Image (cartoon, rainbow, N blue to C red):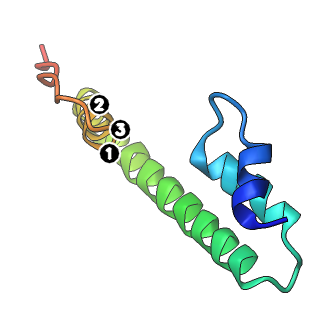
């Protein structure tokens, strides 16, 4: 079975690309270069997401409202949506 067929057989509606990559990696042999590549990509993405979270967490300690506004701008940017105006602190 090739990797394309594994992905097609594994995919479920609503599954994230990361979850699918993890499932496909589990099907591949332990010494597979494709498995190594998928696991390395997932590890890098997890590290970047955690690092991003920690930056916002530190920012929140300084200014909670501005931190929330920055999180929302980031969310819209990452998800390719039109950026809504950030809330104006009262």
Helix, strand or loop at label 1? It is helix
Front-lying residue, 4 or 78? 4
Q: Earlier in the sequence, mark 2 or mark 3?
A: 3
Q: Crowdedness of circle 3 by 10 Å Cα count: few (<14), some, many (20+)?
A: some
What residue do we see at 35% from left, 38% from top? 60
What residue do we see at 27% from left, 33% from top? 76
Q: Is residue 31 left or right of residue 11?
A: right
User: Circle 3 is placed at which residue position?
Assistant: 60
Question: How many marks do you count on the picture?
Answer: 3
What residue do we see at 46% from left, 48% from top? 53
Residue 44, compared with residue 53, is above or below; it is below
Q: Any mark on residue 72, and which?
A: 2
Residue 56 image position (x, y, % from top left):
37, 45
Tag 2 near tag 3, CB within 8 Å: no
Helix, strand or loop at label 3? It is helix
Circle 2 or circle 3, nearest the eye: 2
Front-lying residue, 36 or 84? 36
Circle 1 or circle 2, nearest the eye: 2
Which quadrant would the N terminus be assigned to in this image?
Answer: bottom right
Residue 18 image position (x, y, % from top left):
62, 51
Residue 27 image position (x, y, % from top left):
86, 63
Residue 36, compared with residue 81, is above or below; it is below
Q: Crowdedness of circle 2 by 10 Å Cα count: few (<14), some, many (20+)?
A: some
Between the residue at mark 3 and the residue at mark 1, the CA separation in whole angstroms equals 4 Å
Between the residue at mark 2 and the residue at mark 3, the CA separation in whole angstroms equals 13 Å
Q: For residue 16, what is the image quadrant? A: top right
Tag 3 near tag 1, CB within 8 Å: yes
């Amino acid at each position: 079975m090739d990797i394309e067929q594994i992905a097609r057989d594994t995919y479920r509606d609503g599954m994230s690309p990361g979850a699918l990559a993890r499932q496909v990696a589990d099907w591949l042999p332990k010494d597979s270069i494709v498995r190594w590549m998928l696991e390395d990509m997932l590890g890098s993405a997890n590290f970047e997401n955690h690092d991003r979270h920690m930056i916002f967490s530190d920012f929140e300690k300084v200014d909670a409202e501005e931190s929330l506004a920055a999180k929302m701008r980031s969310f819209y940017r990452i998800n390719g949506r039109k950026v809504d105006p950030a809330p104006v602190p009262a």
